[in-house]
Amino acid sequence: MTGLYTIFVVFLLSINVFSQWVKQNVDTTASLRGLSVVNEKIVWASGTGGTVIRTIDGGKTWKVMTVPGGEKLDFRDVEAFDANTAYILSIGNGESSRIYKTTDGGKTWKEQFRNKNEKAFYDAMACWDRNNCIAMSDPVDGKFVLINTKDGGANWRAMDTDKMPPAKEGEAAFAASGTCLITQGKNNVFLVTGGSAARVFRSNNRGLSWFVADTPIVSGSQGSGIFSIAMFDAMNGIIAGGNYERPDVRNDTFAATTDGGATWKRGATLNGYRSGVTYLDRQIIIAVGTRGGDFSHDRRVLWKKLGNDNLNSVAAKGRKAIWAVGPNGTVSNLDSRALPKHERFDPNKIFYPHRSWLNSLTLSHHEVSKTCASSNSDCSDSHRIRIMASAPDIESPHEYVYTVSAGTVIGNGSNVLWDLTGVKPGKYIITAGISIPVLVSDSRTFWEVLGKTETKVVVVR
């Protein structure tokens, strides 16, 4: 770690979180994932069964629509601009991936694009304005597939991706909330991935050329990676994800950038897998997932649990228009009056960490085998190893951080399980350390692993 960092001890004030999602009465059982909040009055959402819903009175009433010809489609993304104008994108292989548009509030829908590439699977779309939009598919022959329109969708054209870095084998995007692809400003676009790698692709010229950055978000399995990205401005952004197959696993679920996406550093971990994340303002962030939500009142440094609602997507236009959608027709808004006021770092609470915070790392077993000899107490036949870490008492906010070369860490804190189920024979390592908030400047606070770390090796036979 280079440079001089001032370490602020961030004391989390006692907060009673009364924030509750208020479920709306919407006449649909569709699973909803697409969400577009235009303003305090106008909200659009989309989902299974060709379903699109809209309110123009802040949720007092909802119009439920089924797109003609799209009754079997799953609309995972919606991009709306007013009460009348919206694009929707359906996912699926081949012709199941389509784009429709309405300009009369959903009375009529025009099909604008139908995928003819059987290898392609479109995940999301995003727009800079009502005329200029971009959509993306999972990789085909090693490259993400991109299309765009410059005329309001009258024509969608394939984009040249020669200047886009290739996808890694097993890398793809998640059509979980319509936010694996977003635009920002007049020309920026971001695409986030999962699977074998959790990376952020970024372009500052509407997709003509691209850069890619690695992130600390968990990856390596089909269900893990980055699921959502949000940018507050051209430089400051956040990503959230995890593993939807293990939604309670907290490790490496959140990261942030302050340099426009060139680098990403971890923040405090979320309370599990999260498929959607959004800014309310510069200070407050909300993330949602299948096992609940979280909010941060201090630019991602610390998180508080925000209910246990099963939600897929979240979007906001300030503190007076906060919406989320989920399965079985779930549409909810958040009473922002219950959110706490902004908290600030106390510059008088400064200390420097002891360089040997982690005292020890102990494993219950060092060998995994289905045929452990009864006399071998160091061998486990359950494919789960208990990890026990120890460190001096730390009063400031801190987390135990575990990095493994295979398998999954279950739990958090000083005692966790390392699950190696399904891992091929070989040698694998686990590294443990203590992470704390590091305040670099007023606008740059990240969690860093400081001091001594410990590494152990396990053999799977």
Image (spheres, helix red, strand yellow):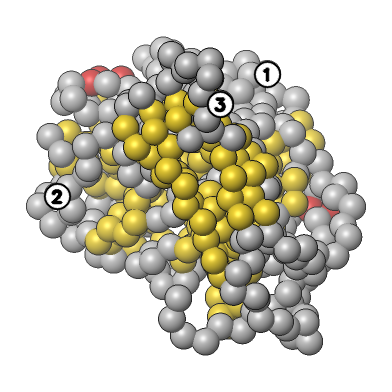
Q: How far apart are marks 2 and 1 (CA)?
A: 42 Å
Q: Is residue 311 left or right of residue 403?
A: right
Q: Distance between the residues labelled 2 and 3?
A: 55 Å
Which quadrant does the N terminus fall into?
bottom left
Q: Which residue is drawn at 68% across and 59% down?
A: 391
Q: Which residue is drawn at 61% across and 84% down?
A: 6
From the top left corner, tell me how far across and down residue 79 is, in percent. 45, 43
- Under mark 3, the amino acid is Ser
**Visible residue check, residue 371:** yes
Q: Dot 1: few (<14), some (14–19), or many (≥20) neighbours within 10 Å?
A: few
Residue under circle 2?
161
Q: What element carries label 1?
A: loop
Q: Which of marks 1 and 3 is nearer the N terminus?
A: 1
76 is higher (above) or lower (below) than 372: below
Whether residues under marks 2 and 3 lie with C-beta atoms below 8 angstroms apart, the answer is no
Residue under circle 1?
27
Q: Is mark 3 on a helix, strand or loop?
A: loop
- Under mark 1, the amino acid is Asp
221 is higher (above) or lower (below) than 429: above
Q: Nearer the viewer, mark 2 or mark 3?
A: 3
Q: Distance between the residues labelled 1 and 3?
A: 59 Å
- Under mark 2, the amino acid is Thr
Residue 75, numbered circle: none
Whether residues under marks 2 and 1 lie with C-beta atoms below 8 angstroms apart, the answer is no
Q: In this view, does 362 lie to the left or right of 48?
A: right
Residue under circle 3?
377
Q: Which residue is drawn at 39% across and 33% down?
A: 459
Q: Is mark 2 on a helix, strand or loop?
A: loop
